[in-house]
Image: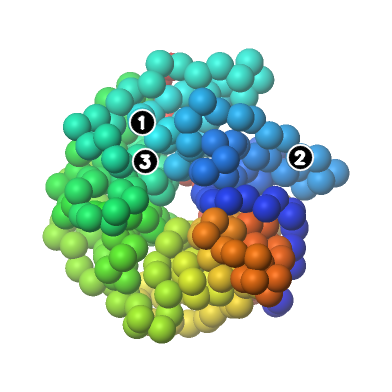
Amino acid sequence: MKAQLLVDARARLGECPLWCERTASLYWTDIEGATLHNWRAADGRLRQWTLPERVGSFALCERDSQLLLGLASGIALFDLEGEALSPIVPVDAEQPSTRINDGRCDRQGRFVFGMFNPAEAAIGHFYRVDADLRVECLPLPAAGVGNSIAFSPDGTTLYYTDSPTRTIWRVDYHADGRLGAPQVFVQLPASEGFADGSAIDAEGGLWNAQWKGHRVVRYDSSGTESARFDVPASQVTCPAFGGAALDQLYVSTARIGLDDAALSHEPAAGGIFVMQTGWRGLPEARFASAR
């Protein structure tokens, strides 16, 4: 169950791995490199797209050739073959220091995401995008680093974090868009690093990447730790289930901020890792674009 290096991506800030079961391939973003990447399982082929802005997160779409991108300044649709961006829908324009960060689709095909503020002051909000690219601000507390967006298998629970607080929250989530009151799901001790991106398995367990923690940790639906897996990189950013049986766990990492001495101890930092965990995931929810 040791993590193996899959792609020596050397990403400054690798994030948001997503498995596409239709193409049997893995997508991820290097946020600081403003690039989108794809690895094809059949032959290991790599593709890369350079974007005009940093891509904080993205979503698969019902149309195979299309992705929904969470660019630094707003939401846009991206045609993979024509490499064309649809008009960008601005988000948080009144807060120029923030950018879009982690996001995932709910079970209704709407994209939910948080914002990132480099100063980590809690001035960013959480948003939801519908099929017509209408952006709605969600009634959740403001955050400095909105992260860990994930949904329970039945879609009735939303998980999220403001990473600097080391707290993962859970919220009742209704199909009509209503949200309940946030409740503490997990509180990480200072020794465990910071909660970053998350994925949900078929049993409802939440897998959380822990920045500065060298690990991915599984919590059951009650918030109790049930497994942890070490990763040979300190800045672990996000997990995703994939593979033909959805039994592979792919993990993105980062090398941003690491000096030569640190990189000598973790030369594969910024790479994409893969491991067998004994659990299976779910197909990634897709954005139900009306365009």
Label placed on residue 1:
none
Residue at (51, 43) in percent of width and height = 31
Placement of 234 over or under 197, stated as above or below: below
Q: Is residue 241 visible?
A: no
In this view, the residue in front, 225 or 45, is: 45
Q: Is residue 124 visible?
A: yes
Nearest the camera: 64 or 146? 146
Task: Give the mark nearer the N terminus: 2 vs 1.
Answer: 2
Picture coordinates of residue 114, whole percent (x, y): 32, 47
Q: Position of residue 5 (x, y in %)?
A: 74, 63
Q: Amino acid at mark 2?
A: Leu
Left or right: where 287 falls relative to 276: left
Q: Is residue 220 left or right of residue 283?
A: left
Kindly identify the residue that appears in the image at 74 percent across and 54 percent down.
7
Point out residue 11 in the picture as x, y percentages from the top left corner: 62, 50
Q: Which residue is mark 1?
A: 73
Residue at the right extreme, as displayed: 43
Q: State how far apart marks 3 and 2 are (Cα).
A: 25 Å
Q: Are marks 3 and 1 in contact (CB under 8 Å)?
A: yes
SS state under label 2 = strand
Viewed as shown, does residue 238 lie left or right of 155? Answer: right
Which tag, 3 or 1, sits closer to the chain's start? 1
Q: Secondary structure at mark 1?
A: loop
181 lies above or below 265: above
The mark that comes first in sequence, 3 or 2, is: 2
Residue under pointer 2: 46
Count the marks: how many?
3
Residue type for callout 3: Ile
Residue 66: x and y in percent read 55, 25
